[in-house]
Amino acid sequence: MRAGGIDIGSRTIKLVTVEGEKILHTLISDTTHDPLEQCKRLMTQASFDRILATGYGRHFFETQFNVFTVTEIKAFARGAKEIFPGCRTILDIGGQDTKAIALDEKGSVLKFEMNDRCAAGTGMFLEVIAKTLGYELDELGTQALKGEGSIQINSMCTVFAQSEVTSLLARRQKREDIARGIHMAILNRTLSLLKRVSTEPDIVFAGGVAKSPCLKYLVGEALGCEVKVPENPQMVGAFGAAIIAQDMKKTRGEYPDNINKAFQAPSSGDAHHDSTE
């Protein structure tokens, strides 16, 4: 059976399909102003018998396509544990939120915290800073590794941080030093969250921000251990949802086991599925 997992995030939508232990598809799209249309577009590019949704947009997907959902916490826990069996701590920094998750030796969630009220230190924050510094987003972390950590960023509010960066540039501070200062500020915020939840190795860094080599290095240096980053860190939630979908049993009503049925929005008389949350 081919199973799919779709992670509908605030900035991007990710779709992974699996069959047994084999990953068949890994697809990603910007969320845009019409996430539902982007979900449909991604699903036409993959084949699967069953799909499970996660992410902030999972509930509208559930309503539209009459399928089950799973929380981001469970999806990331399953995905990270599947990729790194020794995983005990997950740090996920996505487009607009940051999560820290503690797992036991079997992969069950022990504790978690999520900061989704402020975009400070997330992908959206880094996009704004990169643009202000004149870098492509993918360049920011690499350039920050070259910088010195002597510049302190006083505000993590996106608007104020952007203004602060503009002022630093006007004072002829080096761009790479400013980028390093930005990453140090994110590090301090991240460590505070991790220390409240878990810093036990293995630590897996997921989400799009995990692509920053500077932040990976700084977190590992601060905690004195290797930080593991998957090959496609932004796909961990979708992968976890696909694995859960593959293992699901039909215990709560008729599950739509083919994409043709899943594409049909439920009528007002249809029963609403319980989620796997």
Image (spheres, rainbow, N blue to C red):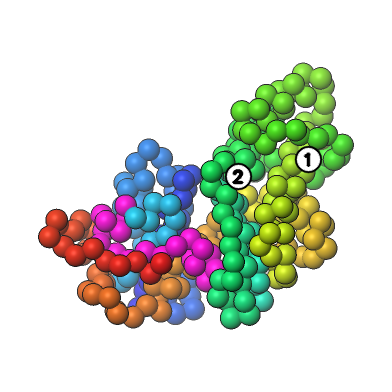
Q: Earlier in the sequence, mark 1 or mark 2?
A: 2
Task: Residue under label 2, please give it.
Answer: 122
Secondary element under disc 2, as helix, strand or loop, is loop
Q: Is residue 35 left or right of residue 154?
A: left
Q: Is residue 262 left or right of residue 125?
A: left
The percent position of residue 258, horizontal first and vertical second, equals 25, 69
The percent position of residue 181, horizontal first and vertical second, equals 78, 38
Q: From this view, report whether residue 223 is shown above or below residue 78.
A: above
Badge count: 2
Residue 180 image label? 1
Q: Inspect the magenta stretch and tell me whether residue 101 lies in it.
A: no
Q: Residues within 10 Å of mark 1 (few under 14, many from 20)?
A: many
Magenta-drawn segment: 60-79
Between the residue at mark 1 and the residue at mark 2, the CA separation in whole angstroms equals: 15 Å
Q: Inspect the magenta stretch and tell me whether residue 78 lies in it.
A: yes
Q: Is residue 93 left or right of residue 183?
A: left
The percent position of residue 241, horizontal first and vertical second, equals 44, 67
The quadrant where residue 219 appears: bottom right
Q: Is residue 244 among what the camera can see? A: yes
Q: Residue at x 57, y 49 (%)?
A: 115
Q: Residue at x 32, y 52 (%)?
A: 60
Q: Residue at x 65, y 72 (%)?
A: 87
Residue 87 image label? none
Picture quarter with the C terminus: bottom left
Q: Residue at x 42, y 44 (%)?
A: 31
Q: Amino acid at mark 2?
A: Thr
Q: Is residue 229 among what the camera can see? A: no
The percent position of residue 202, horizontal first and vertical second, equals 70, 70
